[in-house]
Amino acid sequence: MSEIGKTEAMPLVMPAGPGITPGIRAVAIVAVVGLVSAVVALTAGGYWLSNFTQAYCMALAVLGCALLYGQLGLVSLCQWALVGVGGWVSLRFYHYVHPPFFVTILAGGVGASVIGMIWGLPALRMRGLYLALVTLMLAGAFQSLVTVISFPVGGPGLLGQVGASGNDRIMMARPIFASSDTAYFLFVAAVTVLCIFLVEAHRRTKPGRAWALIRKNEQMAIAAGVRIVFYKAWAFALSGFLAGVAGALLAGLFGQLDASAFPTTNSIVIFIGTLLGGYDAWLGAFLGGILTRFIPALLIALNVNTNVGFMIFGAALLFALRDPLGLGGQLTILAERLYKKLRAQDVS
């Protein structure tokens, strides 16, 4: 996570529009995610249903990245590694304790949250490109580590590997009410909505106000009595929690995880998705997560080399740099203007 320059550090101010209350915003979140999820559940199956489930998990990782970048101006290039941490912890906890699935998700979230805070500690002293490189190296270190130790497969050892190989592998079971692929997708959609509410609650209460002041001017924040270390650590923990939940949901989707699925480049793609979708609105994180998974899935379905996806993301990044609001920000402004116009017509 790295801090951007002062000229870029000013948070984007999006016109909220009169009458846009928290209740209306909550209805919009449920309506948008619910509508998209209903269409996918009714029309997709097999390959595409699995990929949209992964896209929702990716959206949670983008949501955490957008939280850090949008609220504090910090660039996280290790978000996908935190997803892997959450997946590893949830698998080990499941094999060791066999708790209810909700508890397994929380375990993955808390585990990644702790690691996220530890990885975020350098942000208190380092700035700029150096800090971005540090987080990228941490993501690379996780890739190397998980390649060596692999993910737990149900063995009794500390790493869950001893005596568990081949046919001895134990798969993580999904909750009974979400055993089918469609039901599990809808379950992941519901968790995504809850996580969006969690972030929105932070953004619009005391933590969000503290983060905004820290991003604008740390000296001013200190003078105002804001505890810099505490609130930065809080942001790192929340971002890691979201990534950990995503990792646990991925483990539930496949029943097992593979080290090759967590390359360092995915963390960079997540940050690109953050810029493309827009980091100052929840809709941006949701769209960014879907696009970062949908484009590679589409290339595979068309039998096109997935490396073409990096060219597409590169071009999209150029667009995002020209329009900081991103797709989500532009759509949010359009929706708020439309709501304002409709309300004005009702009043008249």
Image (cartoon, rainbow, N blue to C red):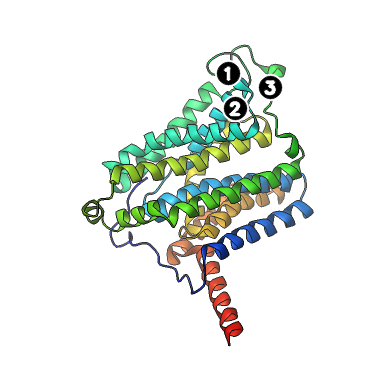
Q: Are marks 2 and 3 in contact (CB under 8 Å)?
A: no
Q: Are marks 1 and 2 in contact (CB under 8 Å)?
A: yes
Amino acid type shown at disc 2 = Leu
Instruction: Give the mark nearer the N terminus: 2 vs 3.
Output: 2
Q: Residues within 10 Å of mark 3 (few under 14, many from 20)?
A: some
Q: Quadrant of the N terminus?
A: top left
Amino acid type shown at disc 3 = Ile
On screen, residue 187 above or below 252: below
- Toward which corner of the image does residue 170 lie, by quadrant? top right
Q: Position of residue 127 (x, y in %)?
A: 28, 46
Q: Which mark is residue 313?
A: none
Q: Nearer the viewer, residue 313 or 4?
A: 4
Amino acid type shown at disc 1 = Gly
Q: Is residue 116 visible?
A: yes
Label 2 to label 3, Cα distance in Å? 10 Å
Residue under numbered circle 3:
170
On screen, residue 279 above or below 166: below
Q: Secondary structure at mark 3?
A: loop
Residue under numbered circle 2:
91
Q: Is residue 305 visible?
A: no
Residue under numbered circle 1:
160
Instruction: Give the mark nearer the N terminus: 3 vs 1.
Output: 1
Q: Residues within 10 Å of mark 1 (few under 14, many from 20)?
A: many
On screen, residue 45 above or below 12: above
Instruction: Give the mark nearer the N terminus: 1 vs 2.
Output: 2
Q: Position of residue 296 (x, y in %)?
A: 62, 49
Label 1 to label 2, Cα distance in Å? 9 Å
Q: Is residue 134 left or right of residue 182?
A: left
